[in-house]
Amino acid sequence: MKKVYVFLFLLLLPMTLSANCYTRCNGWWGDIDFLLLWRNEHEVPSVIIEVVEEQEEDIVLFKGVNFERCPSAGARVDFGLWLCPGIGVGVGIFGLADWEASARGCIDPFELDGFFIEKFDIRYDVKSSLWGGDVYLRHSLIECFPFHLDVLWGFFYTEINDTVRLRSEISFDPEIQPIPFISNTFFLEDRFIVDNDFYAGMIGLHGGFHGKCWDLTLVGKVAAGNMCRKARDDTDTLLIERIQFVNKESADGSCIPCESRKLVKNKFAVAPMGEARFQYWICDWIAATAGYTLYYWNNIILADEEVILRICEDVPLLNPSFKFRDTYYWAQGLTVGFHFYY
């Protein structure tokens, strides 16, 4: 019970410390920002063919390589309404354009379990997306020119997704072919999706210094809550092209169903955020803005640790499996836009 009293005390403390010189008792505010953010590097996993026989060594197609993240464009919109003197409510949403990259790997011809593989190419594609938003209560602590300080608390949500596609092209020597294929080349494609859904409570400070026709705004927030980390095999079918079996019906372009796999893990995570913004007032209620912003999340998972390709026993089809890595994620960069206040 004592913990409940302490929580209520901390929640109501900002109201007890508030200055009495409120100037914002009604009206609304809004922000429209265009983002140009850099995200942390994404590592291409080591792709390994795992050989069943003990006397054989695993074959490494290519080892991990870091993708350098190009800046991603995005947008952020924030809108709020003052309900009564010193107390307002706001909602915000932001998102970045999808980031995509790919890598290719191949190995020299080799013989494996009686199959002479003449060509083995593999392509690794990744697409990453990021978006989120918050709903918050804004309470004015100090409102005395040339300084103001507000406290923010509310709910924060973000979604960080990675879609990974692994596409393999395998060719056999037409003269040394121990299985009854009419065509000696086929393709395999697998797709994995990693979702990181962050549900959290948020608290922060919104401060600013005011000049005659300019403002300097500083915002700091910390969100803490549950990171729901989901990884699933989104390959509804195992795509096989240009294959025909002699003793079976034509399988050219057909699909072999594969079992869907899913992994869900929940973990506590913290996400600090910060922003510094300069505002120049064009007129009484519109200001042009430019600044810097930073987002950070910990305890997310990405499918960039290792990919194991296991050779099936009957035919040389590959069964990919991903090893996921606990890591962090950040996005930082420049913002330009407009601030509205009425």
Image (tube, rainbow, N blue to C red):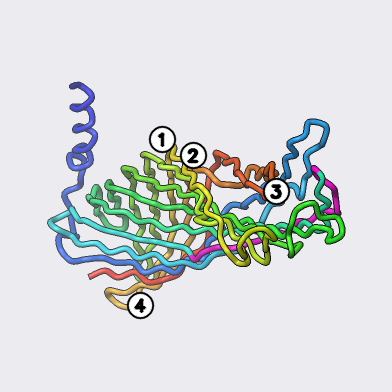
> At 29% across and 67% down in the image, what residue appears?
30
Give the residue pinned by disc 1: 268
Task: Name the amino acid, label 3.
Answer: Val
Give the residue pinned by disc 3: 315
- Can you say whether 221 is above or below 37 in the image? above
Give residue 180's position: percent from left, percent from top. Answer: 74, 56
Q: Which mark is residue 282?
A: 4
SS category of the residue bearing label 4 = loop
Give the residue pinned by disc 2: 299
Q: Which residues are magenta?
A: 97-113
Give the mark toward the camera: 3 or 4. 3
Determine if residue 69 is in view: no
Give residue 234's position: percent from left, percent from top. Answer: 50, 53
Classify mark 2: residues with Cα within 10 Å, few (<14), some (14-19) or many (20+). many
Q: CA distance from mark 4 to mark 1?
A: 44 Å
- Can you say whether 286 is above or below 238 in the image? below
Q: CA distance from mark 4 to mark 2?
A: 42 Å
Task: Name the amino acid, label 1.
Answer: Phe
- Pointers 1 and 2 in contact (C-beta within 8 Å): yes
Q: Identify the mark nearer the N-term, 1 or 3.
A: 1
Give the mark toward the camera: 3 or 2. 3
Q: Which mark is residue 238?
A: none
SS category of the residue bearing label 1 = strand
Q: Identify the mark nearer the N-term, 4 or 1.
A: 1
Q: Identify the mark nearer the N-term, 1 or 2.
A: 1
Q: CA distance from mark 3 to mark 2?
A: 39 Å
